[in-house]
Image (cartoon, helix red, strand yellow):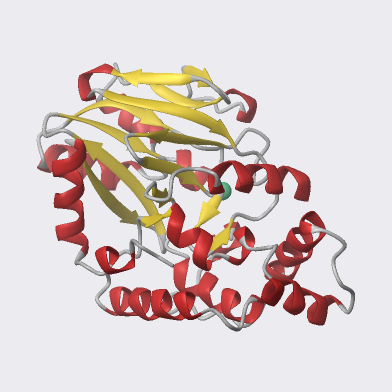
Amino acid sequence: MITGMRHHSVSVQTHLLFQSAMLTFKVTPLPFAHDNYIWLIDNGRHAALVDPGEAMPALVALKKNSLTPAAIVLTHHHGDHTGGVREIVAHYPDTPVYGPAKDNIASVDHPVGDGDKIFIDPLGLELQLIGVAAHTRGHVAYLGHGMLFCGDALFSAGCGRIFEGTPSDLELALNRLARLNDATKVYCAHEYTLANLAFARAAEPENAARDRYAAHCEALRRQDEPTLPSTIAIERAINPFLRTDVENVIDSVTAHCGIRPANMLACLAALRAWKDVFQGCFNPRPCPGDKSA
Ligand SMILES: [Zn+2]
């Protein structure tokens, strides 16, 4: 079912080179804090930074690779996604900062929203915005060149907590992302995959593709490699939040809640509420950041 799985099992470095050849962009995760990633997109000269929650990893990577930032791109207002912007802009004052208008981020000078398109000329990067509110009121995802930068809206094997929206908002957001092309690469902002997979096992006990993906991700994490990017095809096959129409998921939610959800929205709402209090997470490096998932 997961056509990308075999391909996904190559080392991250090879994967990125392959991707670079295809898209003429290199996409590099810059880890910081316990489990955050800044995504650095570059063409060898210019770069875009997605969700720089801290300045230092971005400044070091820019300098080390002789890159000039052409844009900073923010998915939502949380500090672990925006905290490094001011310092980066202090070093590179001409850098435009894109971010969701509805999230009122002080450092954003190019407010954007659902349906907008941005062109980052020095990079040749064109990104389309998709409104995915629920985690925050204005949360957006950026789609372009087969890549999706989705912040805390969709994680591998999970999704962001609902902080400023409703289960209906979450359903709308996840449906919009699930409809994207199978091969779309999912660059989310946190390394939550293993913890999410622990919940996915509880939510959908029988899923052989998920079990294979979990073994693959566990091997990557043992080597301290990122599990990301994932793909939309993988997420549709393993992520319980995109599988609220699957009998096995509905049965688990029914057993957990003591009542069968009336529809997919009720199933998603119950699943999200269950994950909020789920204690069975395996996370080798537990941290407060897990609150986002
Ligand atoms: Zn967040």
Q: How many marks?
A: 0
Q: Is residue 44 above or below residue 227?
A: above
Determine which quarter of the picture holds residue 89. top left
Query: Which of the pair 280/249 is nearer the observer?
Result: 249
x and y percentages locating residue 141 in the rendered image: 50, 37
Q: Is residue 61 left or right of residue 285?
A: left
Query: Which of the pair 42/83 is nearer the observer?
Result: 42
Q: Is residue 97 left or right of residue 40?
A: right
Q: Name the quadrant of the C terminus.
A: bottom right
Residue at x 20%, y 67% (from the top left corner): 10
Q: Is residue 72 visible?
A: yes
Q: Name the quadrant of the N terminus.
A: bottom left
Residue at x 41%, y 24% (from the top left corner): 97
Q: Is residue 195 above or below residue 232?
A: below
Q: Is residue 40 left or right of residue 143?
A: left
Q: Is residue 166 visible?
A: no
x and y percentages locating residue 250 in the rendered image: 75, 72
Determine which quarter of the picture holds residue 270. bottom right
x and y percentages locating residue 121 in the rendered image: 26, 17
Residue at x 48%, y 81% (from the top left corner): 208
Query: Which of the pair 273/33 is nearer the observer?
Result: 273
x and y percentages locating residue 69 in the rendered image: 24, 28
Q: Is residue 255 left or right of residue 3?
A: right
Q: Is residue 127 above or below residue 230?
A: above
Query: Which of the pair 48/173 is nearer the observer?
Result: 173
Q: Is residue 16 above or below residue 173?
A: below
